[in-house]
Image: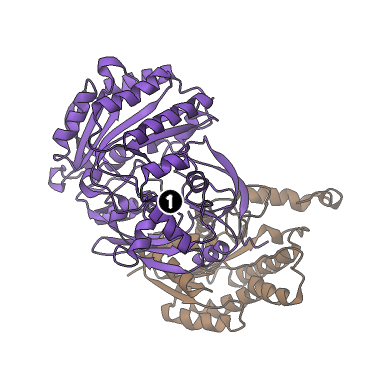
């Protein structure tokens, strides 16, 4: 049987706390994608790295992973590719030719389309902005099946609604991205350790100007004076003259290891977290000018390609928020103490100071601190904790990241994303029947509610 | 100077594209033929961008009886070909398969076009080159699920065997590939009873069979055993299986 459309199957967000059954359409040809767009409602889905329900839909999802044709890589570093190529594939193609991604999130296994739709950011956000700010053109398939060529200078309204638009303006078919020159595939990294939150924040103030890439791994479980202790990393791309002769200039990783099975829920308990954080903190002694291959610096978690299984069947959720510049140690302390009060486990805290926001109507980044914490789901008490953290975030004038979110209400969403109205206005005009909708969009009132 | 051209007929099929990528990675230049101009062109750009090979992409309607002639016209410019891969095929729902109009095009695409195309290209294939015909395990024992499709693939298998006999020892090597279930556009959404094989691995398996000079090969290999058992099953048992 020629399969016109899709396969009904269970899909999940990356945290695997939210799952749904949907008809998954996986077109290999642009023509097939367009045909199937006209016969159902849903959302585009790439490699499924959105943590919550941004790429879950009840009716249909268009999985773009086989629309992954590289179309051009010019001598000027301009890359054009279909939306389903992964960032990892782009690096493997471009790096040996001296080019790399201008911006990358913490995993290389997201698609080009997904990176644009979530307007992702990286460790260099304070210097170069978001992923979408390096995109020169998008070909977008809208609800009527038409292909629109959009960019910062071509239909900019639609472009800046699509960048960060969580797939709700249409399906991104292809995009052009301006890559940046990289003399080598290594980073030269300085490591520091701090004893507490104030010291951690001071480090950013002092070092953001010194390093193109900065990030802090923060111990989300330590309390009292050492609350907010962190391992800080400041890096830059290594220059070619720094390499010894005979060193491979553009090294490539070998394959990832897999997590063989789903661990029992509860494996990553609070005590495991305490131990893990203590070991991690202890391991990273201050060190200067350490040379690291690109994948070790940017993608430490990609060594295991399905690490979500460590969290078991109940999965996990991530709290990531960004706060206005005036928010500092006192407010962060209150947020962390709220988690401690619940004695809730958490892992992999990440803290960074972001630069100015992007013009994307629903883009997450804005100037100020961003904090991310992974929390294993422990039923209702986790949901309650998220609700409290979200309310505190909104009261601080902050916002949570839609690509990570699983709990935001319509009311809080509108407070956090004041440009929601402009977005809905544009969406209503472009997609009057809400052909493009996800469980996220229904939850926060970006579709279905008029 | 490259290694010469491999022609991929059915360039936008899942396995066709994977094989094109495989041979491009090995340093061959690629002639792509497929039905839809924009899609063939995209596959061609992909190969040129990833592997920096030369690509000639042509769009030809394989449903048409002029297909072999048109193909010949575009292939002669890059002759002698180092390889020819027939990767076309069409499968319809069992209920519709016996429709006369559909039969006319499906048997043509699955069998007639293959024969006419390969016979036409033969003078342009290097004597040390190779010919790959992608057939199917569906052609080995007729099953209720897809026996009309299977019958045309059985004809293709027999054609390949004859071609191989004709060239034995003095001409291009002919490999008939009996594909099992591949995770492809054709099988996505279809309940095939088991997960399909990864196209890249399938392409590598096909290329290995070609390199070894095999005249027939099951890809993935486990299908050799599955079909061995299935062929030997007595009818009394076979007829009770819903496969």
**Residue pointed to by mark 1:** A166
Which chain letter matches label 1?
A
Residue, x 38% and y 19% (percent of image)? A340
Residue A5: in sight, yes or no? yes
Q: Tell me which corner region of the image, top left, top right, bottom left or bottom right, holds residue A294.
A: top left
Of A251 and B105, nearer the camera is: B105
Residue, x 62% and y 67% (percent of image)? B89
Of A450 and B32, nearer the camera is: A450
Whole-percent x, y for residue A435 in the image: 54, 58
Does B123 sit left or right of B187 as displayed? left
Whole-percent x, y for residue A360 in the image: 33, 53
Of A147 and A159, nearer the camera is: A159
Of A351 and B216, nearer the camera is: A351
Whole-percent x, y for residue A409 in the image: 47, 39
Does B237 sit left or right of B4 as displayed? right
Chain letter, purple in picture: A
Residue, x 50% and y 41% (percent of image)? A13
**Helix, strand or loop at mark 1:** loop
Residue B82: in sight, yes or no? no
Q: Colour of chain B?
A: brown
Residue, x 32% and y 20% (percent of image)? A279
């Amino acid at each position: 049987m020629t399969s016109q459309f899709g396969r009904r199957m269970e899909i999940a967000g990356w945290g695997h706390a939210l799952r749904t059954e949907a008809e998954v359409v996986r077109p290999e040809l642009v023509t097939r994608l367009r045909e199937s767009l006209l016969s159902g409602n849903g959302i585009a889905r790439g490699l499924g790295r959105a943590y919550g329900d941004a790429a879950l839909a009840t009716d249909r999802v268009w999985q773009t992973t086989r629309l992954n044709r590289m179309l051009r890589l010019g001598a000027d570093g301009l890359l054009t590719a279909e939306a389903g190529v992964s960032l990892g594939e782009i690096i493997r193609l471009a790096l040996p030719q001296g080019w790399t991604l201008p911006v990358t999130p913490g995993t290389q296994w997201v698609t080009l389309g997904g990176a644009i739709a979530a307007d992702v950011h990286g460790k260099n956000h304070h210097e170069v902005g978001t992923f979408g700010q390096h995109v020169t053109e998008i070909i977008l398939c809208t609800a009527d099946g038409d292909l629109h060529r959009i960019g910062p200078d071509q239909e900019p309204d639609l472009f800046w609604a699509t960048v960060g638009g969580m797939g709700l303006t249409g399906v991104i078919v292809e995009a052009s991205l301006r890559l940046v020159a990289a003399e080598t595939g290594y980073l030269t990294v300085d490591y520091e350790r701090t004893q507490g939150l104030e010291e951690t924040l001071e480090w950013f103030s002092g070092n953001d100007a010194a390093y193109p890439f900065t990030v802090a791994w923060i111990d989300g479980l330590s309390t009292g004076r050492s609350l907010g202790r962190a391992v800080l990393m400041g890096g830059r791309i290594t220059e070619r003259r720094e390499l010894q002769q005979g060193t491979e200039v553009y090294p490539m990783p070998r394959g990832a290891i897999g997590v063989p099975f789903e661990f029992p829920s509860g494996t990553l308990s609070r005590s495991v977290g305490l131990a893990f954080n203590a070991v991690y903190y202890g391991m990273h002694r201050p060190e200067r000018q350490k040379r690291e291959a690109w994948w070790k610096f940017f993608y430490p978690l990609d060594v295991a390609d399905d690490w979500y299984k460590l969290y078991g069947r109940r999965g996990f959720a991530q709290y990531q928020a960004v706060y206005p510049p005036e928010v500092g140690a006192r407010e962060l302390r209150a947020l962390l103490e709220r988690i401690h009060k619940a004695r809730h486990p958490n892992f992999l805290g990440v803290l960074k100071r972001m630069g100015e926001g992007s013009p994307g109507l629903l883009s997450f980044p804005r100037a100020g601190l961003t904090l991310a914490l992974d929390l294993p789901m422990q039923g209702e008490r986790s949901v309650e904790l998220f609700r409290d953290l979200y309310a505190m975030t909104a009261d601080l004038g902050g916002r949570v990241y839609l690509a990570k979110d699983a709990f935001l209400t319509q009311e809080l969403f509108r407070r956090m994303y004041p440009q929601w109205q402009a977005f809905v206005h544009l969406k209503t005009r472009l997609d009057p029947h809400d052909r493009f909708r996800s469980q996220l969009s229904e939850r926060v009132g970006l579709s279905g509610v008029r | 100077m490259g290694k010469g051209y491999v022609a991929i007929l059915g360039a936008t099929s899942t396995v066709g594209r994977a094989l094109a990528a495989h041979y491009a990675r090995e340093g061959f230049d690629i002639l792509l033929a497929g039905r839809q101009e924009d899609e063939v062109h995209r596959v061609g750009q992909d190969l040129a961008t990833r592997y920096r090979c030369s690509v000639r992409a042509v769009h030809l309607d394989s449903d048409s009886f002029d297909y072999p002639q048109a193909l010949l016209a575009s292939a002669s410019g890059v002759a002698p070909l180092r390889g020819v891969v027939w990767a076309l095929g069409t499968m319809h729902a069992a209920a519709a398969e016996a429709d006369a109009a559909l039969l006319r095009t499906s048997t043509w695409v699955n069998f007639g076009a293959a024969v006419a195309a390969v016979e036409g290209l033969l003078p342009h294939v290097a004597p040390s080159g190779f010919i790959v015909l992608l057939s199917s395990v569906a052609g080995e024992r007729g099953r209720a699920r897809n026996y009309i499709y299977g019958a045309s693939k059985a004809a293709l298998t027999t054609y390949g065997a004859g071609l191989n006999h004709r060239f034995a020892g003095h001409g291009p090597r002919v490999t008939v590939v009996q594909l099992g279930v591949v995770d492809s556009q054709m099988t996505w959404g279809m309940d095939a009873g088991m997960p399909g094989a990864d196209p890249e691995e399938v392409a590598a398996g096909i290329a290995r069979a070609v390199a070894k000079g095999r005249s027939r090969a099951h890809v993935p290999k486990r299908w050799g055993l599955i079909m061995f058992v299935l062929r030997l099953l007595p009818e009394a048992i076979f007829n009770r299986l819903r496969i």
